[in-house]
Amino acid sequence: MTKTGAEMTTQQMKEEGNNAYKNGDWGTAIDKYTQALSLSTEEKDHAVLYKNRAAVHLKVDDFENAVKDCTKCLELSPKDPKALFRRAQAYEAQEQFEKAYADARAVQAVDPKNKEIQEMLSKLHKIVQDLLEEKTKTSGKVQQLFEILFDPGCEKDKRETCANNMVALAKERAGAELLLKENVVGRIVHMLKAEKNHEIRVACARTLSEFCKDLERAKEILKEVGIPWLLELMNSKEQTVVNATQYTFQTLFNTLAGMDIKQEKKADRVLRAANQKEIDSLMATMVSIVTQRTMTGECRDAIIELVLKNVEWDRLDWGDKFIKMGGIEKMLDICSELEEFDFESRIDITENTRMTTSICLSKVYETQYEDKTRNIYHERVDEYIRLRLLTPDLEHKVRVTVAITTLLLGPLDVGNRLIAKEGILEMMLVMANSDEVLQQKVACEALIAAASKKDKCKSIVTQGTDILKKLYQSKNDSIRVRALVGLCKLGSLGGTDASMKPFSEGASLKLAEACRRFLVNPTKDKEMRRWACEGLSFLTLDADVKEKLINDKNSLRSMIELAKSGDMNCLYGVVTTFVNLCNAYDTQEIIPEMIELAKFSKQHVPEKHDLDDQDFIDKRIKALAEEGAASALVALSKTESNNSKELIARLFNAICQMQENRGLVVQQGGTKALLGLAAEGTEKGKTVAAQALARIAITINPEVAFPGQRAYEVVRPLLKLLNPECAALENFEALMGLTNIAGMSESTRKRIIKEKGLPLIENYMFEPHEMIRRAAIQCMANMCASPDIIKILEGENDKFKYLFLCASDEDEEIIKAAAGALCMVMSESPKCLMKVFQAKDWEEILEFLLSHKDKDIQYRGTIIVYLLVCHDKQTAEKIIDTHCKTALEAINKIDNPEFVMPKAREYAHNTLKLCATQWKLVKDPDVSDD
């Protein structure tokens, strides 16, 4: 019988996968096996393909997927010895020794003569025995821990220690099993009904979050403790308790949906669908109670953050459901809450609530991709505003104005649409022109937010400027500072164009001085200084203001201290001011021909200010870095706003552009913040954060810059810069950074392989740009220290051959890197060593290395030739029958370190000696002709 096209394709994919596996091309092997699985309909084929793919997962240390594939194979082909053995290996690597032992026993039952299994069983038996003993000891410790922790009469310090020990136990599989066996969850629930010690409450929440990392346990905990209980635990004024419980909720979402936000792992659609009931219950309960009056502001912020983190389609895909549940109306109720309306029914809010709500409304709006669904969003907002304005009293007007301001700070399209409605802007202008302080305050804020685009500002400039000037004369500082910011924003409409000045000459500097007086005055509260900083964020588009501000150390320090307070309301003002000072924004390249064309058509051409030349920018960046701007950015990087994250990433990158600033960024905790910014945010933001990380990795010892786990975390963002869409400088810096990361340890090299970085690095080894190609080859040289890379080079491919050809390049640095890599690989792999002769010009290349004027290159050449001669007599004959012999004799005779390195002379001598004494091919170099 002939095979069908599909069957032939399946077989072909499988064979291609097998070949890729033999050649050590793990990424291709996984892709081919996966494609074969999608094409085949035969269970027998599936079993083999799952088993083969599991073998590849083991090679790249992806033990979780190795277990999954082996399990799928065993479901189709029970007792398959290879699948059992591979799963045992994966379990052993995950330190699940009992499961590994059980699988190894199962293999022995099927294949009792298998030596590998006998060795594994011997090793695992001892480990399992030790674990049993340890478990017995741990069980005793658990009992002792329970006796102290759950006894309210015990000493406070001892109970807190036990609570923290409980968290440590919960992180270990065996410890978690013991705790759960002793009904720790039930005990925690009972204890926390009366427990007041916040450290113990935090530890209990953290313990639950560790349990929730396992799917079955997560479901059991949800069933046992219930969502209301978890929400009650989070309903605290103590931020540490709120944070710990919020993390527990996020862990539940991650586990139920198969995602990990920090690792950029999107939700598993199949798993999410299977657990939709639990996900919907969690989210619906939180949304339904978010406006409850009994809830603390800290808890409310935490719930809103959970919504905005998880609402997107590739996470929980909850945007439509949120809108249907009345989530928009709830958010508008929360954000329009004011301290001035101090009723019994007042909702408790924090200083960050309105900003968090604004971001949440924006995130939900972004989930509505179609015009139809966006119209529903608009209709909900319109109806909310309409119903509130049916009662034209002061409170409702004020609340509506505050809600519109929040929308203007979040989903701008929605806010602008409201401003354009008849009567809304007029209402705000009337409120601003009133004599009532609250109306003036909220109207000022709304006018500032509304002045976002020039076309929208015309009516505000026309009607509002005089009102704002009048309000600036107010005796109330809170009104004065808001009016000042409004004037600053209107005065900055010319942007960076030096020829556009909405107000008279020198007005910007006068406004900046007024802002400065609020900013540096210690008697003014934080809110005043925050507004002053926002005013400067508009004025610093003017280069004259930039230069004045950068020389004002008191103002810079005030802004940095304001940012370090953690108040997210100050984020926009501080970050935008710093972005303007550093010119860390995109600027459109102005082509001379286009300028002439614009002049000819009588179009306005923006003019660049002399104070925005690169020398001035560098001076400003250096001043900010020295004042500790990085520490301010670290504090503000916790924001949930993707646009703000991008601005912060741009600033970090601008600071890291100058080599002398990179150490300051590391000292002030910048690398941890940058890793977060490179993982989440806008694509541009993630790219510039990755570039900043690359710059740090180039200059500073990676072991210092990225201690512990961070060395692995930095690999992914750097690899993302190896993209044709990225700029050449970004490619180059990423390769340089990866070179240093690859030089750290075998584990970092394995991480680069696991993240499929090898094909990306190899691709740039063929890059026409000399600097990029050099960096790629240097990176590959460091990767060659890995046994996994050597195995790939041994495969049926031309990878080693190309590396050898690179040793004859015109660029000396490329030659050094390639030759160094050859030395490492050839010393470990006889198979690669013999591949030298696959190159057509191998003689010329070896002679080129031995006779090179650079002593380092010559030294590497002598090592390569020595390794070849050591292999066998036949190989030695090939070498000695070329001009390499003459070159070696010449090197051996030169006893001057200025011309030949002593080590190179030693290798040349040893090569000739070996050819003389062992292979009998030449005269002994130590024997005189006399």
Image (tube, rainbow, N blue to C red):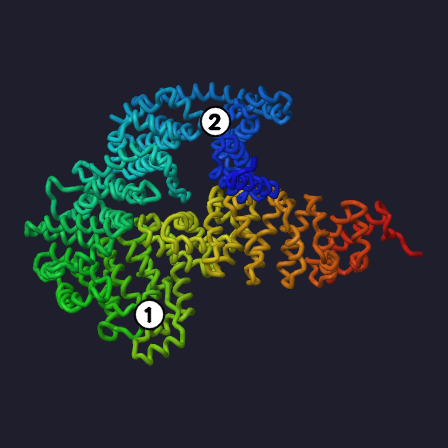
Near mark 2 (Cα within 10 A), the count class, few <14, some 14-19 or many ≥20, is: few
Q: Is residue 136 visible?
A: yes
Q: Which residue is mark 1?
A: 543
Q: Quadrant of residue 412?
A: bottom left
Q: Position of residue 509 (x, y in %)?
A: 26, 70
Query: Which amino acid is tagged 1?
Result: Ala
Assign the N terminus to one quadrant of the image.
top right
Which residue is painted at 7% across and 59% down in the image? Answer: 435
Residue placed most toward the observer, 610 or 735: 735
Near mark 1 (Cα within 10 A), the count class, few <14, some 14-19 or many ≥20, is: many
Select label 1 or label 2 by which is in front.
2
Q: Position of residue 629 (x, y in %)?
A: 37, 56
Q: Which mark is residue 110?
A: none
Which residue is painted at 66% across and 48% down in the image? Answer: 824
Q: Quadrant of residue 646?
A: bottom left
Query: Which amino acid is tagged 2?
Result: Glu
Q: Is residue 477 visible?
A: no
Mark found first going from the N terminus, 1 or 2 = 2
Q: Secondary structure at mark 1?
A: helix
Which residue is painted at 37% across and 38% down in the image? Answer: 269
How far apart marks 1 and 2 lie (CA) works out to: 69 Å
Q: Position of residue 920 (x, y in %)?
A: 86, 48
Q: Which residue is mark 2?
A: 75
Residue placed most toward the observer, 592 or 324: 324
Q: Quadrant of residue 268?
A: top left
